[in-house]
Image: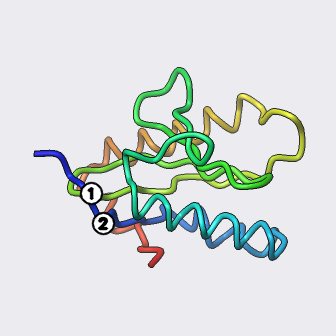
């Protein structure tokens, strides 16, 4: 059976709330709108709002303004924001993608244990 929503969005280890104070109010509003779209559409969310990260399984990015919110999906209609980055140049450095993948992989390895480090966003 395919999950159709609504999706629940979590953050891992303060991936979103920890960076909010570094953003402008316009960036925060745009990012929150994209998070709302993720809750509504889940795996059906596509460009220009969301993009699969090339070279990584189950790793996607929300793309509001100059902010990138990296996320993955978990069973049962759950999406987890694993890392948020501010895009200051034309492209993010490869290390940012590698870090997001590393966090996503640790969540997958920990399985149910990782739920202790997740916080719902809404």
> Are the residues tagged 1 and 2 within 8 Å (C-beta)?
yes
Q: Circle 2 sits in a helix, a strand or a loop, which is it?
A: loop
Q: Position of residue 77 (x, y in %)?
A: 27, 57
Q: Position of residue 88 (x, y in %)?
A: 88, 46
Q: Is residue 38 above or below residue 48?
A: below
Residue under the image location 27 percent in, 61 percent down:
5
Q: Residue furthest left?
A: 1
Residue 77 disc label: 1
Residue under the image location 40 percent in, 35 percent down:
58
Q: Is residue 113 above or below residue 19?
A: above
Q: How would you rate the neighbour count of disc 1 (Cα within 10 Å): few for under 14, some for 14-19, many for 20 or more?
A: some
Residue under label 2: 6
Q: Nearer the viewer, mark 1 or mark 2?
A: 2
Q: Circle 1 sits in a helix, a strand or a loop, which is it?
A: loop
Q: Position of residue 8 (x, y in %)?
A: 35, 66
Q: Is residue 82 above or below residue 7?
A: above
Residue under the image location 81 percent in, 68 percent down:
23
Work out whether mark 1 precedes mark 2 in sequence or the reverse, and give the earlier one: 2
Q: Quadrant of the C terminus?
A: bottom left
Q: Residue furthest right?
A: 89
Residue 19 disc label: none
């Amino acid at each position: 059976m395919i999950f159709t929503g609504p999706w629940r969005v979590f953050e891992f280890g303060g991936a979103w709330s920890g960076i909010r104070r570094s953003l402008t109010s316009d960036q925060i509003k745009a990012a929150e709108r994209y998070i709302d779209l993720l809750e509504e559409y889940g795996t059906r969310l596509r460009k220009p709002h969301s993009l699969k990260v090339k070279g990584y399984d189950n790793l996607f990015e929300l793309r509001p303004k100059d902010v990138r919110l990296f996320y993955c999906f978990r069973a049962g209609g759950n999406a987890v924001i694993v890392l948020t980055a501010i895009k200051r140049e034309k492209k993010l450095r490869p290390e940012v993608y590698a870090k997001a993948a590393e966090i996503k992989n640790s969540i997958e390895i920990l399985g149910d244990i990782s739920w202790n480090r997740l916080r719902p966003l809404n």
